[in-house]
Amino acid sequence: MPITATVATPSLRIVPLDAPLGARIDGVDRSQPWDAATAAAIQQAFLTRHVLVFPGATMDPAGVLAFARRFGDTVAEVNREKRLGELPEVSRINSTIKAIEPGKDLQFHVQTSLRSEEWHTDQSFVERPAKATILHAHEVPSRGGATWFCNTAAAYDALSDDMKRRLTGLKAVHGYDTARARYRPAVRTQEEIDESPDVVHPLVRTHPESGRKALYLNFNRLDHILDIPRAESDAILDELAAWVAQDRFIYRHNWTVGDAVVWDNRCTLHRVCYDSPVGDRRVMLRVVTQGDRPF
């Protein structure tokens, strides 16, 4: 099926990507207010394509925050140390691959950065996880460093009827850390720990706006499925991890400086590919918006 652009206003073009999700948004000024037609068209693209790519020049932290607020109420970064200056909603993510340090047993980076290689959705360890994430590229490596996105609604749709029945009604425990994760997260203060006790979310969630069902997974945060033996829970989660990693569900975004990418955490997973040259800087600004409790 040919890919065609939607001309929503005289200047706005929405171009679906040649992938199971994603669209490029052209002809919109990220720093200026949007009229009703522009806002409605972009919202519809967000719901149907799940990942939106806005090319443009780099924005300062205040500009990124203002842009993010077009996609919902922004929330403060959970980890105080990641907050950027006087804007608690904006975090700075430096995923530059570092050279091996003498005496270190990791290949190139700290464990908290390596966690982003795993398929995950943002903030699933809180009762009302993130709706949208806005990631804005300030520095990108000469090659590599792509962010991969998975369409978890499409992944759910493609499951067998037997697997869908098996997953119906199952709920899982999400925590800031779990023994299932390969790497440990950043150390938190007691205040931060108290703010985010373990929570329970459905394994299949219903999108609150589109009504579409999607797998709700996070392989850094998912500990176990409730009311079944641990071995059975692990087997199901391992099977789902292999399922969502199929190319037919994935879009790989290769970053350009200035890109602002917005994605819907309610029906996507994402991961970073650590394949850029050692020392090539990869620096992003990030903001998330408030979501609803999954159901």
Image: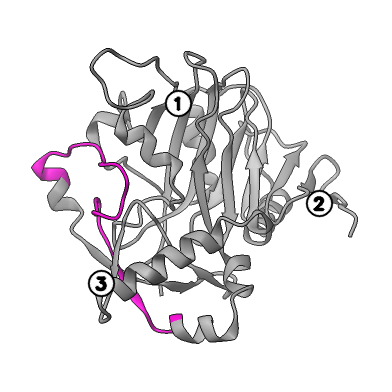
- Per the picture, the main secondary structure of the magenta-coloured stretch is loop
View extreme (right): residue: 2
Q: Which mark is residue 19?
A: none
For residue 292, which quarter of the picture?
bottom left
Q: Disc 1 versus disc 2: distance between alpha carbons?
A: 29 Å
Q: Is residue 215 visible?
A: yes
- Residue picked out by circle 1: 61
Q: What residue lies at 52% left-to-right and 81% top-to-bottom?
A: 163
Q: What residue lies at 49% left-to-right and 55% top-to-bottom?
A: 265
Q: Disc 2 versus disc 3: distance between alpha carbons?
A: 50 Å
Q: Secondary structure at mark 1?
A: helix
Q: Nearer the viewer, residue 83 or 141?
A: 141
The amino acid type of the residue labelled 1 equals: Pro
On screen, residue 200 above or below 136: below
- Residue picked out by circle 3: 230
Q: What residue lies at 30% left-to-right and 26% top-to-bottom?
A: 86
- Residue picked out by circle 2: 8
Magenta-tinted stretch: 167-192
The amino acid type of the residue labelled 3 equals: Arg
For residue 109, which quarter of the picture?
top left
- Colour basis: one colour
Callout 1: few (<14), some (14-19), or many (20+) C-alpha neighbours within 10 Å? many
The amino acid type of the residue labelled 2 equals: Ala
